[in-house]
Amino acid sequence: MKWEYLPKEIQDKMLERQAEQNNGFADSTVFIKDVESYVDDGGFSWSETREEGDFWENVLSYENFDRFYQVYPKEEPEVKSTDPWIVMDKMVVDEDKIWYNDVIDLGFEIKLIGDKVYFKQYGFSYVTVLLECPKGIYFDYEREHPKEVKMLRCDEDGNIIARRTITSLKELKSLVKFFKTK
């Protein structure tokens, strides 16, 4: 086993043990030359550590890294992201945020908008996720601005006369239910 192939946690623990036995002095170059360097060569006495010699033999000679992580479990980083594209077991999710699948479940449809300026600038047509309700009410979810829906009221000619931004799923469900039945 070579030093550069060892996981960082194992390298750090080896340097810690080296420093304990060498008056606070730690030097990784010793282990780069020989990963199993003994105290006389600048390493440390494997059998005089808390883990003892068999532990280090398993980890270094037999490359049994699982043995190391049984004694020193990896610390899981704290996850603070709510980005829906990051898939992690411990992802923090605010259940009242509005996600794409929420609007689809409420009956929103994907609509292709014929915008020549947009097409000329980006090379593809503009697409929005929209829910049309009676009396000129529209709910518009733009993928570019996830977690919010714009509620629009339009006149007979399609001009926007009022707008409101909705960021709560609970509020969105209530408004959609109210306006879909009118």
Image: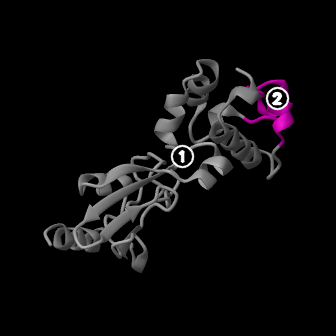
Looking at the image, residue 119 lies above or below residue 155: above
Residue at mark 2: 32
Residue at 61% x, 23% y is 57
Is residue 28 highlighted in magenta? yes
- Residue 148 horizontal side relative to residue 7, left or right: left
Label 2 to label 1: alpha-carbon separation: 57 Å
Please tell me how many numbered marks the rendered image carries.
Answer: 2
Callout 2 secondary element: helix
Q: Quadrant location of the N terminus?
A: top right
Callout 1: few (<14), some (14-19), or many (20+) C-alpha neighbours within 10 Å?
A: some
Q: Which residues are magenta?
A: 27-44
At label 2, which amino acid type do we have? Ile
At label 1, which amino acid type do we have? Ser
Q: Which one is nearer the viewer's eye here, 33 or 151?
A: 151
Q: Which one is nearer the viewer's eye here, 172 or 2?
A: 172
Tell me which label, 2 or 1, sits earlier in the chain.
2
Residue at 81% x, 38% y is 28
Q: Position of residue 91 (x, y in %)?
A: 42, 54
